[in-house]
Image (tube, rainbow, N blue to C red):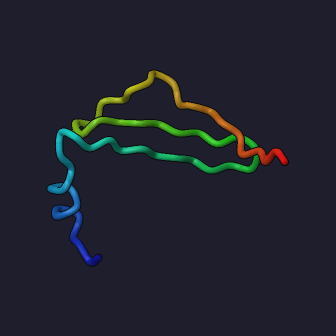
Amino acid sequence: MNLTQNKKLIQITPGTMVVGVDVGRKVHYARAFDFRGFEFLKKALAFSNTKED
């Protein structure tokens, strides 16, 4: 899809949730925002990527 930034922003509706994830080595962080840019949590959600057999 080849969209300009304005066309991408128009696609964000009241039913849209934006999630940003920072992938690190051992600990990853995620934050979620509503369509207006307000955060759902006050702190970033930390999680690890562990694989259990």
Residue at position x 17%, y 46% in the image: 13
Q: Nearer the viewer, residue 42 or 19?
A: 19
x and y percent of residue 51 in the render? Answer: 78, 48
x and y percent of residue 7 in the render? Answer: 17, 64
Residue at position x 21%, y 50% in the image: 12
x and y percent of residue 5 in the render? Answer: 23, 64
x and y percent of residue 30 in the render? Answer: 53, 39
Image quadrant occupied by the N terminus: bottom left
* In the image, residue 43 above or below residue 28: above
Tally of numbered tags: 0
* In the image, residue 26 above or below residue 46: below
Residue reaching furthest to the right: 53
* In the image, residue 33 above or below residue 9: above
* In the image, residue 38 above or below residue 48: above
Quarter-wise, where is residue 38 in the image? top left
Residue at position x 22%, y 36% in the image: 36
Residue reaching furthest to the top: 42
The answer to whether residue 44 is left or right of residue 3 is: right
Residue reaching furthest to the front: 53
Residue at position x 24%, y 40% in the image: 35
The answer to whether residue 14 is left or right of residue 47 is: left
Quarter-wise, where is residue 48 in the image? top right
